[in-house]
Amino acid sequence: MRVFFILWFCFGLASQAITQDKELRLLFVGDIMGHTPQITSARQPDGSYDYDKCFRYVKPIISEADLAIGNLEVTLPGSPPYKGYPQFRSPDELAFALRRAGFDMLVTSNNHTNDSGLKGVIGTIKTVKQTGHFQTGSFLNQAERDALYPLIVYRGGLKLAFLNVTYGTNGLPSPAPTLVNMIDTAEIRRDLLEAKALQPDAIIMITHWGGEYQLDESAEQRRIADFCFRHGVDVVVGAHPHVIQPIKTKTYVKEGGETFEGTTVYSMGNFISNQKQPNTDIGLMVEMTIVKKEGEKKASIKDVEYIPVWRHIQGGRGNKGNTYEVIPISKYENAPREILKMTEADFNTMVSQGNKMRAHLNKHGGKERKIKTVENAVETE
């Protein structure tokens, strides 16, 4: 018996020694917006704001990820007036709700970063961090950027470097001493040199770029993506157009002549908003796995998959007491419509939009992650 136990124990140790590969599942979502009707919808009778219902249907998916990242395209100045377009000011409760929904990181370099001036830039950074998120893209001052950028995140035994840049800030200059990262290839190259010097397992670039409402990426987006990959980035994830753009994989050559596959998610569309333009009611959650095999110096990106999500306005646009909801389409499109308490017209729109965007993505090689269909209302509680 003792010999058997010793053999069993040694076999167990040997098995652990063999399986030292590390894997990390990342999830990204597109534009998290805060138009005036969304703010009105979240306002409670006591003057507080409740955004939790917005994310209840996607919370299980977000929480599954080892690291969930969102693009926060509003400012959090910390006090009224709160308003939407063209200069977004949302209540801090939005950040709390995103954390409860499972988000681990919010990036803040986008064209609305400076919408509410110095108070907004500072308030957004501090609130995002105080609610338990990692944050990058905008900074309180140069000293903070020097100390904390590129953002290094340790998770699951892996060391990741995150960079975040935007094409502009709608003509609003960054109020001193704050800073917002811009798409400047010279600056990006310097930041990537610093990132590589820190020897992360993977470098992730999150970009705010492209033409609004354009379903295909521009030549400029492709140029920037190519530049990033040539200088050390492992994956590029984009936002801003408010509609879904392709996910494409291309072969690149490293300086030493070695080839590798680089994937660019050009635009994830809107995650939640009140936009009315065509195709702005649908977006993507994009998942990918970072794998580092035992003995290898760098990790690799695999299984880049999308989950289409649809923005539903429960109660109808403009009605008092309505609720903005993010619905994972594949989880509910084959379920009884009554589970979502959705009108037939809304349900048909959700299914139609889902199929339209699948066709758009799949023609470029996009891969969808299939989710088990909900069968009864109990599962949605």
Image (cartoon, rainbow, N blue to C red):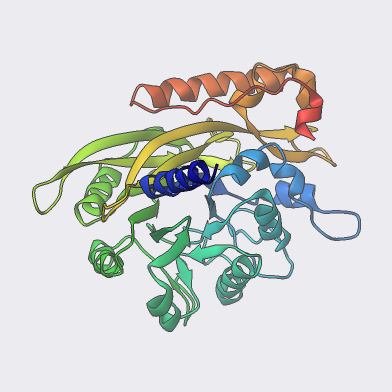
Q: How many marks?
A: 0
Name the residue rendered at 24%, 61% in the picture. 185
**Would you place residue 94 above or below residue 343 in this image?**
below
Which sits in the foreground, 303 or 147?
Answer: 303
Say which residue appears at 42% left-offset and 42% top-offset: 289
Let me know if residue 189 appears in the view.
yes
At which x and y percent is residue 134?
53, 64
Q: Is residue 309 left or right of residue 182?
A: right
Judge left or right: residue 373 versus residue 29. Answer: right
Question: Is residue 27 in view from this perspective?
Answer: no
Viewer-closest of 101 and 212:
101
Picture coordinates of residue 115 (x, y %)? 56, 64
Q: Residue at x 41, y 79 (%)?
A: 147
Q: Quadrant of residue 64?
A: top right
x 48%, y 25%: residue: 357
**Residue sitting nearer the eye, 79 or 96:** 96
> In what quadrant of the picture does the C terminus appear?
top right
Q: Position of residue 265 (x, y in %)?
A: 38, 40
* Rendered position, 250 above or below 107: above
Q: Residue furthest right?
A: 45
Q: Quadrant of the N terminus?
A: top right
Residue 231 in percent (x, y) is at 21, 57
Above or below for 156 versus 75: above
Residue 328 against residue 86 in the figure, above or below? above
Image side of residue 190 versus residue 269, left or right: left
Q: Quadrant of residue 350?
A: top right
Residue 340: name its quadrant: top right
